């Protein structure tokens, strides 16, 4: 078996069929679902996927490692449910790992993505360049590959604001990489040493169907990020929250030229700034709660008391350590990350 595709899901009925259809050239699909209440599981099984349903939610990194542990292929491609492999990317993956590029790629395969792929290629020369099906295996074989990702937001492909080219390491030899145990912003790290490269073609990423989805995810991410920082002993004040929020807007809208992304660029910069502010404000309240608990022995931290909730799912996005889903990068600098 040459290639396994792994996906983690929760309530991804709107995406899972198109996602798996875009990787029909793979030998197996592994889907790990964390309690979907829609028909995600049934749809995945109808597409031929092996599905594992889990009762708990350990975080994105551990959940992806569960999927990785089930994979049998020589190579593993990790994809999020809201991502699509374009025909150009499929052909390049096949060439790199030495499998029949025509497998599962009929004349009509991926037609819904062809226009999107051309949009990305026309916007940034040198990306999205297809590799003709049936070409021989790449002689410069690597152990892992980053894949650029072109993301759409509210009807526009975002080419600035820190969202492009947004390379994510998703294709690697099984046994040579694992996901970090991070609750959010997980990434693949090598087991030992490897030779990594970057593909030319890109994913299409349907990041958020509307502004409500972006705001909801930003809120969940800020809660997870605040808990991660709290666990590392970080502290925050209202001034640091304001400072991080202001700097996030400046970085995304001006330094990363978000103003070139039109109205969507303004929305992304403002939402990212709000998410960054919320992250540190939540950490500040966690710090305050810790002080109160120190004076009340036997009491445990109540996350809900400081505005934090359990998060369960994401169509993955995606930075390194702690970042906002609208930023595609960490506070400390450009990405990318993830």
Image (spheres, rainbow, N blue to C red):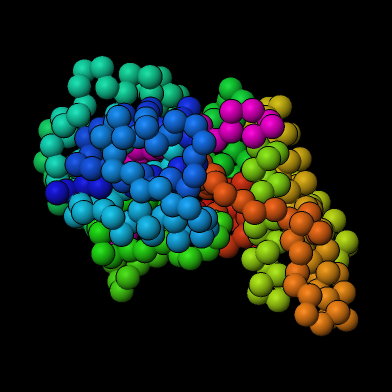
Residue shown at the point (41%, 61%) measured from the top left: 179
Residue 176 makes an appearance in the image: yes
- In the displayed structure image, the side of residue 234 where residue 316 appears, left or right: left
- In the displayed structure image, the side of residue 324 where residue 118 appears, left or right: left
Q: Specify whether residue 206 is painted magenta.
A: yes
Above or below 183: residue 13? above
Residue 83 makes an appearance in the image: no
x and y percent of residue 204 in the render? 44, 33
x and y percent of residue 124 in the render? 46, 33
Above or below 12: residue 307? below
Residue shown at the point (56%, 57%) measured from the top left: 184
- In the displayed structure image, the side of residue 81 where residue 3 appears, left or right: left
Residue shown at the point (21%, 27%) measured from the top left: 105
Total numbered badges shown on the rendered structure: 0
x and y percent of residue 110 in the render? 32, 23
The quadrant where residue 159 appears: top right
Magenta stretch in the rendered image:
195-213
x and y percent of residue 88 in the render? 30, 31
Residue shown at the point (33%, 63%) measured from the top left: 177
Q: Specify whether residue 243 is painted magenta.
A: no
């Amino acid at each position: 078996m040459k290639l396994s595709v792994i996906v983690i899901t929760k309530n991804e009925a709107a995406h899972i069929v198109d996602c798996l259809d875009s990787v029909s050239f793979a030998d197996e699909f592994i889907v790990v679902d964390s309690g979907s209440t829609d028909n995600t599981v049934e749809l995945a099984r109808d597409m031929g996927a092996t599905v594992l349903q889990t009762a708990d939610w350990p975080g994105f990194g551990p959940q992806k490692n569960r999927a990785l542990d089930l994979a049998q292929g020589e190579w593993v491609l990790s994809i999020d449910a809201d991502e699509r492999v374009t025909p150009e990317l499929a052909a390049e993956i096949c060439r790199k790992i030495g499998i029949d590029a025509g497998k599962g790629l009929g004349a009509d395969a991926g037609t819904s993505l062809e226009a999107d792929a051309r949009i990305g290629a026309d916007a940034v020369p040198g990306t999205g360049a297809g590799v003709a099906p049936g070409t021989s295996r790449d002689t410069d074989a690597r152990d892992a590959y980053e894949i650029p990702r072109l993301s759409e937001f509210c009807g526009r492909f975002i080419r600035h604001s820190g969202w492009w080219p947004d390379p994510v390491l998703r294709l690697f030899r099984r046994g040579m990489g694992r996901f970090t145990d991070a609750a959010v912003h997980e990434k693949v790290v090598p087991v030992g040493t490897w030779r990594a490269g970057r593909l030319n073609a890109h994913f299409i990423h349907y990041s958020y169907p509307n502004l409500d989805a972006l705001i909801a995810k930003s809120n969940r991410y800020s809660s997870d990020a605040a808990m991660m920082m709290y666990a590392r002993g970080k502290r925050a004040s209202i001034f640091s929250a304001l400072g991080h929020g202001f700097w996030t807007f400046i970085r995304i809208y001006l330094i990363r030229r978000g103003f070139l992304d039109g109205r969507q660029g303004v929305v992304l910069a403002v939402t990212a700034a709000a998410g960054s502010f919320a992250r540190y404000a939540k950490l500040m309240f966690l710090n305050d709660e810790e002080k109160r608990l120190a004076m009340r022995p036997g009491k445990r931290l109540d996350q809900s008391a400081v505005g934090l909730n359990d998060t369960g799912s994401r169509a993955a996005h995606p930075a390194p350590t702690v970042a906002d889903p609208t930023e595609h990068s960490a506070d400390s600098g450009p990405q990318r990350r993830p």
